[in-house]
């Protein structure tokens, strides 16, 4: 089998890259080790930067996010028992973020790929990458007991932190990592969001909480928990009670509770692997970087990687120029590190750390107070929250 670009991973980054390349007339095949239902079953992020929404429109799959996505003009910070709105829209000259679940974005991309008859191999086992440091890369995989080979010009590794793409170059990657001493207990519930037009970030004496949404009838809530907590320790009743304790009284009184349809604990960490290009193999998304979810940057960073990579490949085939390919890693990492910084800052600002009592706690309180009353710092938060431009100067 022969194609121009072999894409490893059918998550949102791989599917988005495949769709953008197809629109540009570039052949591609996607390999995914899981089933379509498994991919759609992943419960992930739901806040899209404007740049990500624009990419979905460019890929021809923006109709549903435009019709069903919920635009947020502000975020709200809760600390010392009071709520403080940050006018993201006003502080950024009209930019917004959109609440639209990653599952829905993935579904849109999968359906578009199926409708256009583009090749995707699900349940591709034992995928291995070969000769990507030369001119003729090769991908091998097993399917239905048979071994298959794909000859290609380039390989795009969009298969996540634990995928074969990162593992294939692990010895050549410089890794930077920070592990946080707590996790997020999150639930998904079919109840109306407590704040339908803003994301709520709460800093309380009991720890962090987040009120988010997937739609006007489905909400996503989180509370900070110790790393050794187990999901089984948390009944729905205990979760709702703890969430309310971490919000201001007015907001807590408006929480509508219901049974959880998904409940999980996620550890928080920051990770970056450099570089992101190895000959004719490129890493994108979680294969190259992870951010704590506090800044809503994970999915959006994957989309910006895809923006840089798809543009580079279009230039290669259409303009016979490798300038974009040669600078892909540098350009992507410049934006990645700024998003890593923002996500670290938001995490440091909003959580209770076990070793930060006393001086550290008072500094955090002063930072929150300054943020709530400083247009300059609020503007910095807003600019990063809606997403920095793809072309940084």
Image: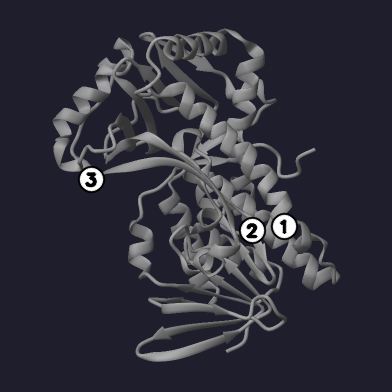
How many residues crowd around disc 2 within 10 Å: few (fewer than 14), some, or many (20 or more)? many
Q: Nearer the viewer, mark 1 or mark 2?
A: 2
- What percent of the width, then of the height, locates residue 226? 27, 32
Location of residue 375 with respect to 136 vertically, above or below = above
Could you tell me if the residues under marks 1 and 2 are in contact, i.e. CB atoms within 8 Å? yes
Residue 72 appears anywhere in the view: no
Looking at the rendered image, the quarter that the N terminus falls into is bottom right
- Label 1: which residue? 328
Residue 324 appears anywhere in the view: yes
Q: Nearer the viewer, residue 267 or 186?
A: 267
- Label 3: which residue? 261
Q: Looking at the image, tell me whether mark 2 or mark 3 is earlier in sequence order.
A: 3
Looking at the rendered image, the quarter that the C terminus falls into is top right
> Residue drawn at (46%, 65%), measured in percent from left and top?
163
Q: In the rendered view, does 217 fall on the left or right side of 331?
A: left
Q: Quadrant of the rendered structure where residue 328 is?
A: bottom right
> Residue drawn at (50%, 51%), measured in percent from left and top?
64
- Label 2: which residue? 276
Residue furthest front as drawn: 171
């Amino acid at each position: 089998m022969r194609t121009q670009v072999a894409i490893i991973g059918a998550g949102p980054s791989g599917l988005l890259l495949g769709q953008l390349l197809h629109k540009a007339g570039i052949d591609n095949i996607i390999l995914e080790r899981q089933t379509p239902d498994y991919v759609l079953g992943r419960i992930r992020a739901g806040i899209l930067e404007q740049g990500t929404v624009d990419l979905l429109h460019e890929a021809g799959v923006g109709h549903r996010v435009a019709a069903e996505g919920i635009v947020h003009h502000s975020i709200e910070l809760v600390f010392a028992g009071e709520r403080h709105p940050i006018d993201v829209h006003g502080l950024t000259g009209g930019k917004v973020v959109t609440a639209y679940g990653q599952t829905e974005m993935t579904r849109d991309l999968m359906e578009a790929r199926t409708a256009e008859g583009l090749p995707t191999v699900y349940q591709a086992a034992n995928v291995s990458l070969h000769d990507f440091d030369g001119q003729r890369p090769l991908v091998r995989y097993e399917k239905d007991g048979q071994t298959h080979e794909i000859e290609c010009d380039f390989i795009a590794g969009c298969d996540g932190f634990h995928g074969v793409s990162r593992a294939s170059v692990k010895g050549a990657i410089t890794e930077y990592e920070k592990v946080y001493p707590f996790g997020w207990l999150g639930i998904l519930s079919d109840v109306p969001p407590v704040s339908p037009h803003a994301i709520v970030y709460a800093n309380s004496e009991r720890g962090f909480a987040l009120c988010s949404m997937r739609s006007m009838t489905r909400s996503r809530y989180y509370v900070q928990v110790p790393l050794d907590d187990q999901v089984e320790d948390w009944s729905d009743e205990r979760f709702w009670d703890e969430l309310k304790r971490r919000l201001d009284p007015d907001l807590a009184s408006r929480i509508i509770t219901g049974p959880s349809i998904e409940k999980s604990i996620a550890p928080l960490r920051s990770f970056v692997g450099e570089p992101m290009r190895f000959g004719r193999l490129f890493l994108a998304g979680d294969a190259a970087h992870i951010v704590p979810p506090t800044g809503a940057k994970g999915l959006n960073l994957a989309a910006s990687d895809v923006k840089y990579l798809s543009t580079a490949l279009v230039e290669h085939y259409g303009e016979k120029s490798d300038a974009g390919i040669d600078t892909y890693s540098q350009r992507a990492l410049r934006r990645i590190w700024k998003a890593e910084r923002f996500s670290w800052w938001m995490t440091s600002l909003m959580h209770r750390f076990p070793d930060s009592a006393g001086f550290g706690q008072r500094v955090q309180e002063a930072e929150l107070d300054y943020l709530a009353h400083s247009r300059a710092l609020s503007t910095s938060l807003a600019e990063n929250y809606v997403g920095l431009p793809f072309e940084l100067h």
